[in-house]
Image: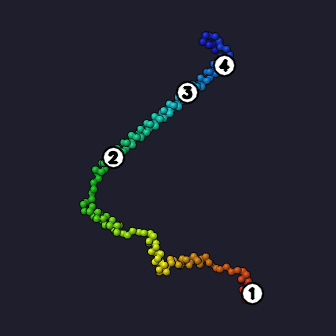
């Protein structure tokens, strides 16, 4: 290795230059990798923007097409009911709503209260048969104490 004037470098200068070259290569490599990442990110952002712009245009076009189809369908569909049928439908719907309005309001608490009062006034306490079955199934056979059995057997002798 030779310096700018053509003189040979000393051992320490050569070592320092090698270290400097190594550091420069590392810095070049890291700067190159950073630039590549930045370019890649920029491309991805452009792709995303491009995709979002495409999506935006597709949505706008689809909404415009839907509006055109809706307007064409509205023009194409005509009410094919005759005047007499329309009047009959109106009359039946009005009668139905009158029936609904005339129907009494349903009050749950009052209905439950009235049913319970009727049961107690008529001495009807619900399904007594079911209650009897439940009570009898719990009793079953009465358990007899062994000492009672022994006492009875002694009395019989």
Name the side, left or right, on which 131 lies relative to 11.
left
Instruction: Please tell me which of labels 2 and 3 falls first in the chain.
Output: 3
Q: Is residue 156 above or below residue 146?
A: below
Contact? badges 4 and 3 (CB < 8 Å): no
For label 4, the SS is helix
Q: Residue visible at 41% across and 38% down?
A: 53
Q: CA distance from mark 2 to mark 3?
A: 53 Å
Q: Secondary structure at mark 1?
A: helix
Q: Position of residue 115 (x, y in %)?
A: 46, 75
Among numbered discs 3 and 1, the one appearing first in the sequence: 3
Question: Between marks 3 and 1, how big is the CA–CA gap?
Answer: 113 Å
Q: Residue at x 29, y 63 (%)?
A: 90
Are the residues at dot 3 and dot 1 in contact (C-beta closer than 8 Å)? no
**Which structural element holds mark 2?**
helix
Badge nearest the viewer, 2 or 3: 3
Q: Which residue is mark 2?
A: 67
Q: Which residue is mark 4?
A: 15
Q: Earlier in the sequence, mark 4 or mark 2?
A: 4
Judged left or right of residue 105, residue 145 is right
The image quadrant of residue 141 is: bottom right
Label 3 CA crowd tier, 10 Å (few <14, some 14–19, many 20+): few
Q: Which mark is residue 154?
A: 1
Read off the residue under disc 3.
31
Give the x, y percent position of residue 127: 51, 77
**Which quadrant holds the C terminus?**
bottom right
As displayed, is residue 25 above or below residue 131?
above
Residue 65 in percent (x, y) is at 34, 44
| Residue 102 image point, x, y percent | 34, 69
Mark 3 secondary-structure assignment: helix
Mark 2 vs 3: CB contact within 8 A: no
Mark closer to the chain start, 1 or 4: 4
């Amino acid at each position: 290795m030779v310096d700018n004037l053509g003189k040979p470098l000393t051992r320490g200068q050569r070592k320092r230059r090698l270290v400097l070259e190594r550091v420069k290569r590392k810095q070049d490599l890291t700067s190159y990798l950073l630039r590549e990442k930045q370019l890649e990110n920029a491309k991805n952002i452009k792709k995303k923007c491009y995709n979002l712009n495409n999506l935006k245009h597709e949505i706008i076009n689809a909404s415009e097409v839907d509006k055109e189809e809706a307007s064409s369908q509205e023009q194409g569909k005509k009410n094919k009911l005759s005047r007499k049928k329309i009047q009959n439908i109106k009359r039946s719907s009005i009668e139905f709503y009158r029936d609904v309005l005339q129907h009494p309001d349903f009050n749950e608490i009052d209905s439950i209260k009235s049913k319970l009062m009727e049961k107690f006034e008529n001495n009807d306490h619900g399904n007594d048969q079911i209650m009897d079955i439940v009570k009898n199934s719990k009793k079953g056979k009465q358990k007899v104490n062994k000492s009672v059995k022994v006492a009875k057997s002694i009395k019989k002798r």
